[in-house]
Amino acid sequence: MEKEELYQTKLKWREGRLALIKRYDPTSYTIEEATRCLGLLNLELPDASQELVEQELHPRRSTFTCFLRLPSELRLAVWKLLLPGRRLTKLVYYGTLWDEDADVEITIVPWELRPRDPKLPVTLFVNQESRQYTQETYHIVFQQMTGHIKIRNGMIVPHERTLCLNPVLDQVCIDMAEIFDRHNCFQQSYDQEPHCFDSVRTLELRDFHWLSFDHTMGGPELVDFFLFDDEWVKAGGILRHFRNLQSLHLIARRDLPHERIVRLAKGARKSMDDLLTTWYTHMMDASEVQEYSGGVRIMNSAPKIFFHNWRRIEARTDEAYLNDARIFEEETE
């Protein structure tokens, strides 16, 4: 069949004049012509008959079934690459509301403002090997008593958090207002993974604007709480769960001018040093008693204190964590 025989020719009035129009006629397309076209197509496709290798002509599979046959060293290298990098975890309670009938303090936040914690590492969910590898460095804590959430239908339900923390790599912060932890909320979290929190070396205390430690803005209350509250049962607040800190970073409130921050830091630096040194010294003495009686919690020394202007809540390198927005000692002298 000639090529021209596949088309019909007609005269049509188009754009104000007669035009000769060619139109493809499928009724004249024979099986012989189709076979010839397929033969030409086979010449264009590499290994169209799949004689050399079997090909998948459907979308690629999303799994690699031979992964478990790889050497264990390669599999562990893959799990290591899938672990998250350094993250910052905020240990915080979300607002407060006093329930007079129940005589307890309840924390309630709207559903839209519920906390967004760092996601759990994906390696916790792949298989048993990846989960075990992750748990060698990451500690999982089911944190309760973090308040209540008002869900979309108006019901108020208790809120719980699943924290996954690498104390060697990750960074931790809390709000300065939560340092008291008067209801001992954090004890339940600490009891699950004491080794994790004992291994934390740096801690951020956010928003220290109200705290000057000069006996004019809450200083006496804080001193009494740290040194005398409940005969040391709850003294020190949440800090008693971080007994091996090497550095404590106080971060100023965002809307405070730099000059006022420097004044606050100047009044707080020595008082804070004296307060924490006294408290940590007592806790170190208590640790020695625990060690002598078979306990395992040992406190090394009081952490070094650093003051900072406001900075974003985000994970940083060790150098940036120490120096970003830092108020150096010569500024407060």
Image (cartoon, helix red, strand yellow):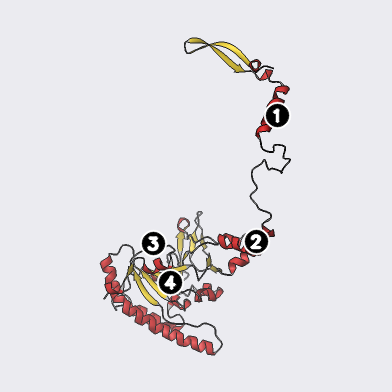
Mark 4 or 2, nearer chain start: 2
Q: Residue 304, labelled with which disc?
A: none
Q: Which residue corresponds to the image point at 36% horizontal and 81% vertical from the top-left?
A: 275
Residue 314 pos. (x, y %): 43, 62
Q: Residue 39, labelled with which disc?
A: 1
Task: Estimate the spatial distance between the alpha carbons at disc 3 and disc 2, rounded to whole Å.
Answer: 36 Å
Which quadrant holds the C terminus?
Answer: bottom left
Residue 74 pos. (x, y %): 63, 61
- Decide: is 40 above or below 94: above
10 Å crowding of disc 4: few (<14), some (14-19), many (20+): some
Q: Disc 3 residue type?
A: Arg
Q: Residue 203, labelled with which disc?
A: 4
Mark 2 or 1, nearer chain start: 1
Q: Does dot 4 land on a helix, a strand or a loop?
A: strand
Q: Does dot 2 land on a helix, a strand or a loop?
A: loop
Q: Nearer the viewer, mark 2 or mark 1?
A: 1
The reply to whether residue 99 is in sight is no
Task: Estimate the spatial distance between the alpha carbons at disc 2 and disc 1, rounded to whole Å.
Answer: 48 Å
Determine the image quadrant of residue 162.
bottom right
Residue 71 pos. (x, y %): 67, 62
Task: Estimate the spatial distance between the alpha carbons at disc 4 and disc 2, rounded to whole Å.
Answer: 33 Å
Q: Disc 2 residue type?
A: Asn
Task: Estimate the spatial distance between the alpha carbons at disc 1 and disc 3, rounded to whole Å.
Answer: 66 Å
Mark 1 or 3, nearer chain start: 1
Q: Which residue corresponds to the image point at 47% horizontal and 75% vertical from the top-left?
A: 184
10 Å crowding of disc 1: few (<14), some (14-19), many (20+): few
Q: Which residue is mark 3?
A: 312
Q: Nearer the viewer, mark 1 or mark 3?
A: 1
